[in-house]
Image (tube, grey):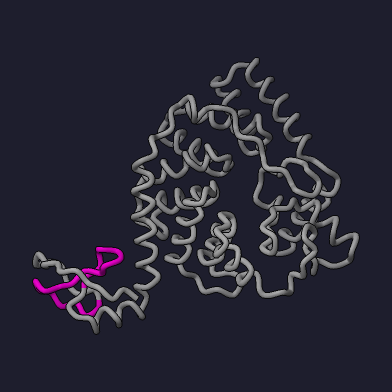
Amino acid sequence: MIDVMADACANGTEACAACGKAGCSLKVCNACKTTKYCSRDCQLSHWRGGHKDECKRMVAEQAMNVKLSQIPEATDEELFAPHPPQDECPICFLPHPMNDQGTQYMACCGKELCHGCVFGHISTNGTGSLCPFCRSRNANGTLVERLQKRVQANDATACHTLGSKYEAGSEGVPQNMDKAMTLYFRGAELGSAQAHFHLGGAYLFGEGLKEDLAKAIHHLEIGALGGNVDARFCLACLESKGRREGRAVKHFMILSRAGHDDSLEKVRDAFRDGLVTKDDYEKVLRDHKESSDAMKSSMRDEAHAIWIREREDMS
């Protein structure tokens, strides 16, 4: 709870955020410096009624805006450099698949495992109650409780993962966009490219944050430079929507060479439209196959087949 309020004179259109009363004796929340109140009672009421989460999100956003203002926009040389190598699974040491469904974050030890190794562990042991990496019991507290501990330890991936639970209202937590965005901001501050992607999407579509295309692009660029596939794919789609097809194709080709299937489809369309030369297209096909083969394993194929069947059963 913020105990101190600074004076602020209303301009005739501003009013107390709690009761709606206007006047020149309004006070400003000392944390977010934005929300105004006519009295301490109104401040307490509004804080307990939801401003607590909103205020934390606003403070986190303000801090991120300051940080972003100090980060220059990416140059084309940086933006169109080869995609960073995929992180490796700490069990099989193969590069992680390029889709979110191909990995699982373990909140017990903070490791991100490929679904092939998770599936192999369950197949061998007949249970998924033990973490395949650290062997701790997943029953030791709920997933949210384990994520909260990892967040307290400044785990960037845990911040992003817990934020996604609040955004979706899953794993037993109520949907809370303010908490989700606060966690995304913290994850981005700690270096999570995924968090930057989600912030970019929030600014792009005005979901959880006020719509702002410039901020959306800045976060997406940081996410893309950090190796987030979805962030680069989103940038490519924005370039295509803006009829900057040459730039869009560059993004799709970068992802295709790294093994991204959806981007390869886009490059194939561009080749048919005459936007990609035959030599470049052939090179992309070779690089895509090489990258895809490096990420494959029999266990991953089996795990993916099970995931497809489960999706079909749900539909």
Where is residue 254? Give x, y as percent: 59, 30
Does 57 appear above or below 23?
A: above
Which residues, given as a range, are shown in magenta? 18-36
Identify the residue at image location x=71%, y=59%.
Answer: 311
Q: Is residue 67 left or right of residue 248?
A: left
Q: What residue sits 37% from the left and 75% below the top?
A: 50
x and y percentages locating residue 1 in the rendered image: 35, 76
What predominant SS class does the magenta segment belong to? Answer: loop
Q: Quadrant of residue 253?
A: top right
Q: How many marks?
A: 0
Question: Which quadrant, please, contains the C terminus?
Answer: bottom right
For the question of whether residue 246 can be seen, the reply is no
At 51% from the left edge and 74% from the top edge, which residue is drawn? 174
User: Could you tell me residue 227's position as x and y percent?
Assistant: 58, 40
Residue 19 on the magenta span: yes
Q: Is residue 106 left or right of residue 17?
A: right
Residue at x 54% of width, y 49% of height: 192
Q: Position of residue 220 (x, y in %)?
A: 47, 42
Up-down relation of residue 155 to residue 44 (above or below): above
Looking at the rendering, which quadrant does residue 124 occupy? bottom right
